[in-house]
Structure formats: C-alpha cells, structure tokens
C-alpha cells in the first residue's frame, strides 16, 4: 500500500507542477492533498467514506504531504476477527428488524436493546437467563449496528476463548492473547460462564472473567455486551466483586429471564 501511495503521489505532483504556476505554495499543497484524498483505493470488506478504501489519508504537515492511517483500519481488523470467529453469518440474519417481538416482554426487551445501541457512552448491556429468548440475537444486532457506525467490535465466544486463554495462562503468550479482548472499544462476550456438559464454573474461570471485566470496568469509555444464562444474583454468588462490577456498569441495561414469560427489566 505504501508503494502505491508513493507512486500516486509522484504521478500527481508531476501532473500538477506545470498547471499551478499562479497559486501560492500553500494553495498548491492543499490542492494536491485534496486530489490525493479523492483517489479510490482497493480495500474491500468495508466501504469507508473517509479514505475511499485506501486505508490512509493525506495531510499537509509543515509544508509536506504526510500519509496517516485511517480509523477504518480498526473496523477492518474487527471485521476480520469477526469473520474468523464465525459471527459474520449471524450478523446477516440476527438484526433488530428480524427479531420477532410478538409478546409484550419481547417488545420491551427489543426497545431496551435498541436504546442501548443508540448510546454513545461507556454503558454495558447484560442479557441473562434461560436459552431461547433471543439474547444472542439481540446482542449480535447491537454489534452489527456498532460496526455500521465504524466502531471497533470484538466477539468472544466464552466457552472457546476461555479454554484457549487458560491454556496459556502461565506462558509469555498470555498477555498478548488477552490484550485485544481488554482493549476493544466494544467487546461482546457470548454465553459467559458456559461450561461443557454442565460442569461447574471453576476458580480459573472466575479469575479470568474478573481480570477481563475489571480491565474494562476501570475504563469508562469501553463498552461491554454480555449474554449469559446465569442472572446477576447468581454471578454475585460466584464472585461478589465480579457481580458487583457487572451490576454497576449495566445499570439501566440489564434484563433477566427467570421463566418463559417472566422478564425483569432493571
């Protein structure tokens, strides 16, 4: 990409050198920057209006043209991670429009999640309770809406990723492996504390969850979306510090299902 940009810059400068003899140096430089930023790139997977899919944008700095990375690079990394995680296919089908809100509690739940999707702060969304109510559907819809707005989103299927992280806990690779989950602008943890064949949640799982949640809890700008079968009360029983942090950060955006038609929106 850098070689292509250098070539484009050289060609453009040669073309403009002979046609802008009456302009000041600042005006000539501004014209060059504008022309370079009007060029279309060849990156795919996300249509960026800022860099026109080049991945970089030109700026005038101290009389020279400087190329700076476009924010869409983070979005493209998010999309690549989501494709590799398997969430991509769900993004196409699990949208707000496709959620079947027939019952009153479903309509309230949909409204709650849509309100969350419109937030711009560091609020957290936690959907808890029995399977089959659409927790994953609505959390995925939130991620899709965030990606459309150009936000950095990462998807963590707890059962798979927690096993991988615990396997390297004592290795030098651990910090590098867990860092992206901690640093993502929006992290979606799907099925927190889901275990294989009904196994109990172990101490290693609780320590891992606390480390991850606490790293995001202390940063008021990071948003976290969580789906889980356990309620917040059950999480508090497992670990009071973890449950307390989830309760505090999801205030106003927590929903718990204790029965087929018994939702509590808190």
Image: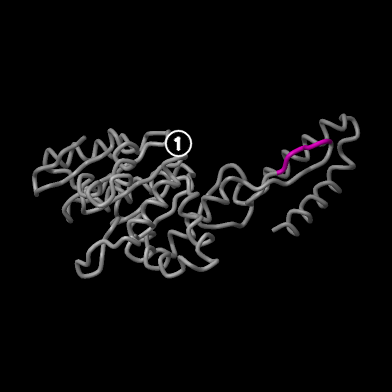
Instruction: Name the quadrant of the C terminus.
Output: top left
**Residue nearer the viewer, 63 or 5:** 63
Which type of secondary structure does the marked residue at label 1 adopt?
A: loop
User: Residue at the location (50% across, 63% down)?
Assistant: 174
The reply to whether the magenta stretch includes residue 253 is no
**Residue nearer the viewer, 263 or 6:** 263
Q: Residues within 10 Å of mark 1 (few under 14, many from 20)?
A: few
Q: Is residue 97 left or right of residue 68?
A: left
Instruction: Name the quadrant of the N terminus.
Output: bottom right
The reply to whether the magenta stretch includes residue 61 is yes
Figure quadrant of residue 240: top left
Q: Is residue 204 above or below residue 256?
A: below
**Residue nearer the viewer, 102 or 263:** 263
Position of residue 206 measured from the top left corner of the image (x, y, whole percent): 33, 56
User: Residue at the location (32% across, 44% down)?
Assistant: 241
Figure quadrant of residue 51: top right
Q: Is residue 105 left or right of residue 167?
A: left
**Residue nearer the viewer, 145 or 210:** 210
Q: Is residue 104 left or right of residue 62?
A: left
Q: Which residue is mark 1?
A: 220
User: Residue at the location (51% across, 52% down)?
Assistant: 46
Position of residue 81 measured from the top left corner of the image (x, y, whole percent): 47, 60
Majority secondary structure in the magenta region: strand
Residue stretch rendered in magenta on the structure: 58-62
Position of residue 163 measured from the top left corner of the image (x, y, whole percent): 37, 67
Position of residue 118 measured from the top left corner of the image (x, y, whole percent): 37, 34
Q: Is residue 71 above or below residue 87?
A: above
């Amino acid at each position: 990409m850098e070689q292509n940009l250098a070539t484009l810059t050289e060609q453009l400068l040669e073309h403009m050198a002979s046609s802008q003899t009456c302009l000041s140096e600042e005006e000539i430089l501004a014209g060059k920057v504008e022309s370079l930023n009007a060029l279309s790139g060849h990156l795919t997977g996300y249509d960026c209006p800022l860099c026109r899919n080049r991945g970089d944008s030109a700026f005038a700095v101290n009389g020279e043209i400087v190329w700076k990375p476009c924010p869409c690079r983070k979005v493209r990394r998010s999309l690549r991670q989501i494709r590799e995680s398997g969430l991509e296919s769900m993004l196409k089908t699990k949208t707000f429009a496709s959620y079947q809100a027939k019952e009153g509690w479903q309509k309230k739940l949909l409204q709650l999640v849509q309100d969350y999707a419109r937030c711009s702060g560091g609020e957290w969304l936690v959907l808890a309770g029995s399977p089959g109510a659409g927790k994953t559907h609505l959390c995925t819809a939130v991620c899709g809406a965030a990606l459309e707005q150009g936000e950095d989103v990462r998807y963590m299927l707890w059962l798979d990723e927690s096993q991988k992280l615990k396997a390297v806990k004592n290795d030098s690779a651990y910090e590098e492996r867990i860092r992206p989950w901690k640093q993502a602008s929006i992290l979606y943890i799907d099925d927190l504390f889901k275990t294989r064949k009904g196994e109990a949640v172990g101490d290693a799982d609780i320590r891992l969850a606390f480390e991850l949640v606490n790293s995001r809890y202390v940063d008021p700008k990071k948003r976290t979306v969580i789906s889980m079968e356990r309620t917040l009360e059950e999480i508090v029983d497992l670990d009071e510090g973890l449950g307390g942090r989830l309760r505090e950060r999801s205030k106003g955006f927590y929903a718990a299902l204790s029965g087929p038609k018994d939702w509590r929106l808190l």
